[in-house]
Amino acid sequence: MRGFFAACLVLLSYGAAMAQFAMGITAGVNYGGPIGKIEGSGKPIPGLIGGAVFNYKLSPKWNLAAMLLYSSRSAEYQQTSTNDSTVYVTVGQNQVPVTTNYTSNINGTLRLHYIDVPLLASYYVTKCGTVDFGPLFSYIVAGSDKGTNDIVFVENGVFNQKVQYNNIGELNRFDYGATLGGTYHTKFGLNVALRASRSFRSVYRKGFFSSRGFTETGLYNTFVHLTLGYTFGNHASAN
């Protein structure tokens, strides 16, 4: 008899635990790009974000969520720098070194595809509204950092050399950061979320800029995400 009651207690506990779980989907857009102190300018390109959401209702006021998302992050950028160089000029039968300068004009486009895993804690400030916060882990699965470097040498005139490049191998594949925002939940399972995220690891590897004649700096992914989601079964709302 005690075994029967124990089995019933296990089933009830399991049912109660499962009642707190819910799955959902989400999709939307993000806008932003790498931000930091760097010589040059850039223009963000809106990207897409979407995937699966796994919720656990910890209490009437607290909800935990783990997400598995695809995220595209893109931007255009321009950089210009002037540096000294040494060229050799023929004087009679001798090669004489002459110091001159060159200007590097870089125009590129960054197109990256990430897998994002946000781990969020949500607190209900109203019956339908939550404040969401937590860590964000990301990994680059594909992408490119392509462009052209137009190098202009000044020596008895102007000499141009345009070089194409792809710096994808110079990026840090793994990224981590934090996200903060809010979500409005409806009783029908639909929800709208607006969040901002900031990475704590530079997009490029250390030494990348200094090896190319620029001041070494860190560029950190900073984005705003607007998504529309749907929760199946146990709709997330405060009691």
Image (cartoon, helix red, strand yellow):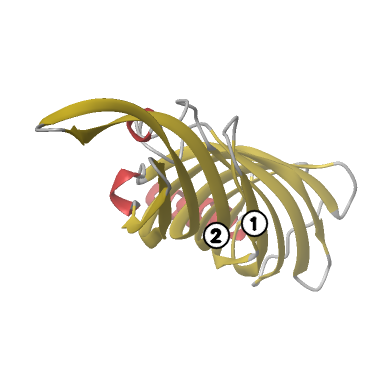
The amino acid beneath tag 1 is Pro
Kindly identify the residue that appears in the image at 44 percent across and 57 percent down. Answer: 115
Where does residue 109 sit, x and y in percent of width and height?
Answer: 50, 60
Q: Secondary structure at mark 2?
A: strand
In the image: residue 51, left or right of residue 131:
left
Where does residue 208 sit, x and y in percent of width and height?
Answer: 35, 34
Where does residue 136 sit, x and y in percent of width and height?
Answer: 53, 42
Residue bearing mark 1? 44
- Mark 2, residues whose alpha carbon is within 10 Å: few (<14), some, or many (≥20)? many
* Position above or below: 17 against 52: above
> Which comes sooner in the sequence, label 1 or label 2?
1
Kindly identify the residue that appears in the image at 34 percent across and 51 percent down. Answer: 167
Residue bearing mark 2? 74
Where does residue 155 sit, x and y in percent of width and height?
Answer: 38, 40
In the image: residue 126, left or right of residue 229:
right
Spatial separation of the CA atoms under disc 1 and disc 2: 6 Å
Q: CB under 8 Å between callouts 1 and 2?
A: yes
Determine if residue 239 is in view.
no
* Position above or below: 211 against 65: above
Determine if residue 128 is in view.
yes
Q: Residue furthest left?
A: 93
